[in-house]
């Protein structure tokens, strides 16, 4: 292999490594052990060809399998730790691996592992890199890609849409590990010598620079960043005395000029699909009810809820009012699964759901919005709805990936039209007025085809002139058979919409039942609406 073919092969292998790291980082998994995973694959493949006389291709499969076997437990650990602590843990794992290899005679120690055949050619490296790039490009615009972008932007919101964030991240980490192991096998049979020091933190930082420089949102960007970082030092080799300085300046200038990377992901545009009528886009909603009873919750020594409950039936709008700090949002969090009660039960159609996580409750038909909108800000309005459409749920029989993609697009477009959002479908959520963001969040919840919808102060922040349209929309949803549990401070809106009402004060339901009777109840007047002054004293 001549020098230039070697450079092409090295750039392709580094591109594959960068692609594998971009795949993990773009899903919101912050880890510092990608270089170590590459090293695991490299050593496994080199051992197989040198000591066990395995052919080259089977050794690459072994490398991928070994790294997946190691990566999956690491990804499970991520669900137990926060993002910061997981990054520290993976950094520790990488450093421990380096120390173990330095002190292993079988691995060659500090001298390095040698003796494996140099079987990686430029065509082979380009083939594997191209195949990985094509695979991830397809996945990026699939339901898998929508879920990845959603979990990176807001894992909690994704859970409320029915996405099992931890499970999805395990799958992402496994695929990233497999690609890293495959790249490691190619690297081992390209350079000929494996040195433990090349697998530590510095190597991971170099990989991070490749991904960030090229563009973290797309595998094409990661590949381009890897090519630049690999070939730039060789281009500058003639200026040996100032090579590192020029290299650093070029990289800094590129990052300043293109802070989001050389290549960015192009947002998906809403397709020109004919709007599906509301009735046609609905899902069968069997009769049943949501029963919440005896809920108690304390945070430390503060008792937030005491014996709170509600019964919600299809098509009913049940309001919940109370002063700030009364425990209303905590109650909604418990119903949706974001909080676990200290006592009490949540039962859906006679099936206990008290301990079910939020994604499981969403799949049972409980959707929600948040007190402060939790849209995915960098995604367009249309893409926000696609994340919800990509969530596993009650969408019927298993479909092919292509049929599922068409169905997701059709459902998202239908909601854009139903909520009057077609004109802003391609606008990033962060650029939308707050009132429109509220509508997008409700539309996103509706894409999951819920039976019960939990609204946390839907009129908060909305201009007064837009509230009648919001009221009409909520009433339309109830007329479609969706049971709605609505926390609200706008008393005229409560009077207009709610079929029944509960008043919570200091974590206790002070009254429940008919709306007007609850609003005129002395405890409501004293705790929430204010006690009128007595005149003529």
Image (cartoon, grey):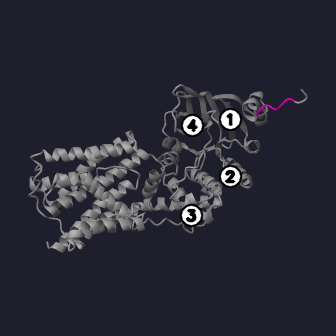
Is residue 471 in view from this perspective?
A: yes
In the picture of the structure, the residue carrying the numbered disc 2 is 462
Q: Earlier in the sequence, mark 2 or mark 3?
A: 3
In the picture of the structure, the residue carrying the numbered disc 3 is 427
Q: Earlier in the sequence, mark 1 or mark 2?
A: 1
Is residue 62 in view from this perspective?
A: no
Badge 4: residue crowd in 10 Å (few <14, some 14–19, many ≥20): many
- Based on the picture, tell me whether residue 44 belongs to the magenta stretch: no
| Whether residue 331 is situated above or below residue 151 in the rendered picture | above
In the picture of the structure, the residue carrying the numbered disc 1 is 323
Q: Earlier in the sequence, mark 4 or mark 2?
A: 4
Q: Which residues are magenta?
A: 530-534
| Pair 4/1: label in front | 1
**Residue 530 x %, y %:** 76, 33
**Residue 497 x %, y %:** 73, 44
In the picture of the structure, the residue carrying the numbered disc 4 is 335
| Whether residue 8 is situated above or below residue 373 in the rendered picture | below
Residue at image position (72%, 41%) is 498
Quick check: marks 4 and 2 in contact, CB under 8 Å?
Answer: no
């Amino acid at each position: 292999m001549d020098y230039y073919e070697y450079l092409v092969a090295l750039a392709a292998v580094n591109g594959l490594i960068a692609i594998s790291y971009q795949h993990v980082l773009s899903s919101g998994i912050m880890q510092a052990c990608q270089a170590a995973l590459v090293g695991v694959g490299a050593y496994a493949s080199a051992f197989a060809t040198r000591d066990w006389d395995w052919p080259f291709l089977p050794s690459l499969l072994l490398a991928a399998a070994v790294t997946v076997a190691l990566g999956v437990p690491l990804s499970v650990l991520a669900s137990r730790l926060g993002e910061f602590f997981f990054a520290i843990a993976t950094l520790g794992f990488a450093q421990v691996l380096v120390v173990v290899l330095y002190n292993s005679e079988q691995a060659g120690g500090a001298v390095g592992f040698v003796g494996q055949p140099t079987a990686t050619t430029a065509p082979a490296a380009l083939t594997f890199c191209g195949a990985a790039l094509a695979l991830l490009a397809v996945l990026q615009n699939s339901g898998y890609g929508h879920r990845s972008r959603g979990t990176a932007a807001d894992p909690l919101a994704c859970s409320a849409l029915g996405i099992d964030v931890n499970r999805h991240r395990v799958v992402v980490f496994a695929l990233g590990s497999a690609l890293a192991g495959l790249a490691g096998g190619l690297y081992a049979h390209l350079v000929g010598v494996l040195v433990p020091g090349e697998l530590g933190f510095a190597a991971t930082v170099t990989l991070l620079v490749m991904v960030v420089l090229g563009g973290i949102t797309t595998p094409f960007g990661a590949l381009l960043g890897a090519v630049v970082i690999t070939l730039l030092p060789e281009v500058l080799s003639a200026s040996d005395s100032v090579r590192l300085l020029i290299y650093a300046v070029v990289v800094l200038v590129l990052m300043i000029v293109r802070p989001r990377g050389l290549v960015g992901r192009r947002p998906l545009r809403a397709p020109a699909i004919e709007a599906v009528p509301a009735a046609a886009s609905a899902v069968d909603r069997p009769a049943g009810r949501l029963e919440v009873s005896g809920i108690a919750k304390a945070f430390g020594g503060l008792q937030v809820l005491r014996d709170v409950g509600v019964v919600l039936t299809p098509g009913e709008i049940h309001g919940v009012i109370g002063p700030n700090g009364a425990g209303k949002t905590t109650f909604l969090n418990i119903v949706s699964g974001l909080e676990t009660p200290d006592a009490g039960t949540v039962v859906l159609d006679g099936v206990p759901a008290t301990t079910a996580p939020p994604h499981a409750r969403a799949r049972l038909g409980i959707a929600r919005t948040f007190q402060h909108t939790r849209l995915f800000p960098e995604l367009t309005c249309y893409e926000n709805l696609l994340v919800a459409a990509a969530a596993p749920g009650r969408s019927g029989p298993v479909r092919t990936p292509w049929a599922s993609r068409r169905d997701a697009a059709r459902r998202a477009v239908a909601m854009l039209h139903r909520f009057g959002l077609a004109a802003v479908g391609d606008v990033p959520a962060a650029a939308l007025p707050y009132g429109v963001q509220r509508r997008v969040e409700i539309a996103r919840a509706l894409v999951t085809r819920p039976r019960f919808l939990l609204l946390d102060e839907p009129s908060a922040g909305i201009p007064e002139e837009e509230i009648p349209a919001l009221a009409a929309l909520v009433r339309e949803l109830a007329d479609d058979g969706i049971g709605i549990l609505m926390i609200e401070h706008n008393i005229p809106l409560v009077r207009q919409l709610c079929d029944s009402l509960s008043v919570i004060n200091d974590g206790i339901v002070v009254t429940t039942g008919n709306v007007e009777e609850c609003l005129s109840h002395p405890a409501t007047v004293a705790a929430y609406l204010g006690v009128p002054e007595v005149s003529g004293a």
